Image (tube, rainbow, N blue to C red):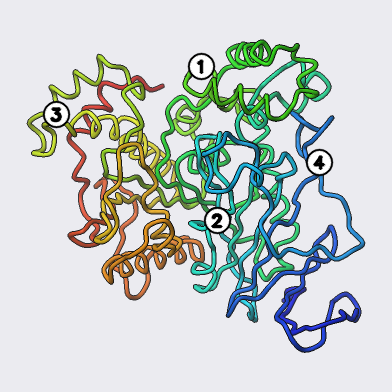
Amino acid sequence: MRRPCWFLAFATGALLMFGSNLHAQLGERFVFALTQEGQVLGMADSDIAKFMGIPYAAPPIGAARWRAPAKAAQREEIFTASKFGPSCPQAPGQTFEAPARNSEDCLTINVFTPARMDERLPVMVWIHGGGLSSGTAADPLYDGSALARAGLTVVTFNYRLGALGWLASGILSKDEEDDGIGNYGMKDQIAALRWVHDNISAFGGDPDNVTIFGSSSGANAVAMLMASRRATGLFQKAIIQSASFRDLARDRNTAESAAQAFAQALGTRQVEMRQSELQKIVAVQEKQAEDPGLRPAYTIDGTYVDEQLQEAIAAGHEQHIPLLIGSNGFPYSPNARSMPGALLQKLLQMTSGLHPDFSGKDAPARIRTDWVFSEPTRFVARTHAGHGSTTYRYLFDYVSERAEPPEEGEDGQEIRFVFGTLAVRSGLYSHRDREISNTMLTYWTNFAKYGDPNGSGVPVWRPQSVRDDLLMISNSGVICGPDPMKERLDLIEHLDSRP
């Protein structure tokens, strides 16, 4: 078995080259890795080695704006990977970082891995959420240290957001027609996965045992990658946390109309948009964010995206790999526009007697939660399992004993429990909170290692079957059993119009 091409070094001064590896004199703790692009220098924090801000693609700037990502350049010098790269451009206030930390030169990747190992480790690749318009891999919620301590190599990365990542213009893409139009953020994600495939062994990871996982729009990305021919073979397992699934993509004509509207708002022609000022692009993007027809979205281009996701799943066009999938039980659906008003009223009438919680002011939010998340999640779990793929489904309904309860519109509550980052932006947490986090971390890492979340020390989690069992994580405990949402999700399924 080939050993990873890196190791810990304790250094205070000059670095010495020996063969293909770097060595250092005693002192501080550094780590080195040899990637296809060149040597990288990371830092060892306790028992975890961290490499941050490594370019996985060339900067998409200037003439490369609104083009597929190109390979990162070869480097002769050592790249210092001691801090996160800048976030991709987004409106002020959409990330915890200051706007000054936003840059178009943002296609960077981060690796967390045990400081010592004797064998290749399973790899988990996280795709952040943010509605395709915000977010960053530098968010401390996504610190991969706790997952790495469980014996994995963890990867996070940035991808282009907003108009820069998802605008689809045939005019801008006329010399890349064979590569589709738009979907630049998705192309970045695939480029990052290719980088992982080509380089992760240098960090101790196994390129043939990769699990991709994400939450919210990051979970949508996982599902879209499962259904994309361009991502085949780049990962072997998938975890989908709180995905929406409904109408994620536009047809080409609709996408091109949105591109034209964007150019008009910029006050320029589409062919000249590459020369537009970044600040103006971000300002227009922020202004159009409230219009569903102009928000960032996937484009059905026949190359990266062939059809709506639910159509792909129904037809069995997704990769048939082990899947762990679930959603939150909180009434957190974004707003009243997330489903047709007439359908909402009809379901409110039909479900009023099914559950004591389905009354009062929370009822509309709970119905929207079921429509946007819970029922589509069940559909994907059932259908994927029906294609012969091992599938595990969960419902996360746990509310931290110390933190404030989630607000409406706040999804992905399981993230901090999966990553073990309970104190980030929440402060105090209880012993029970930590127990739930440890349980979830065990399930997630077992699945990444073996394709099965079960193991010693955690309750049995049965796979998806005709019984519709799922794992319920709540303040009452962690138990696998019949779906408590079945009756009302059946009503939504009956009223829905699927292929």
In space, the residues marked 2 and 1 are separated at their CA atoms by 32 Å
Circle nearer the N terminus (1, 4): 4
Say which quarter of the image contains residue 236: bottom right
Q: Nearer the viewer, mark 3 or mark 1?
A: 1
Under mark 2, the amino acid is: Thr
Is label 4 in a helix, a strand or a loop?
Answer: loop
Residue picked out by circle 2: 211
Is label 2 in a helix, a strand or a loop?
Answer: strand
Question: Which residue lies most toward the bottom here?
Answer: 26
Under mark 1, the amino acid is: Gly
Q: Which mark is residue 293?
A: 1
Is label 3 in a helix, a strand or a loop?
Answer: helix
In space, the residues marked 3 and 1 are separated at their CA atoms by 31 Å
Residue 374 x %, y %: 31, 38
* Residue 405 horizontal side relative to residue 291, left or right: left
Residue 129 x %, y %: 51, 43
Under mark 4, the amino acid is: Ala
Tell me, yes or no, whether the two marked residues, 2 and 1, touch with CB atoms within 8 Å.
no
* Residue 429 horizontal side relative to residue 349, left or right: right
Under mark 3, the amino acid is: Thr
Residue picked out by circle 3: 351
Circle nearer the N terminus (2, 4): 4
Circle nearer the N terminus (2, 1): 2
Residue picked out by circle 4: 70
In space, the residues marked 3 and 2 are separated at their CA atoms by 37 Å
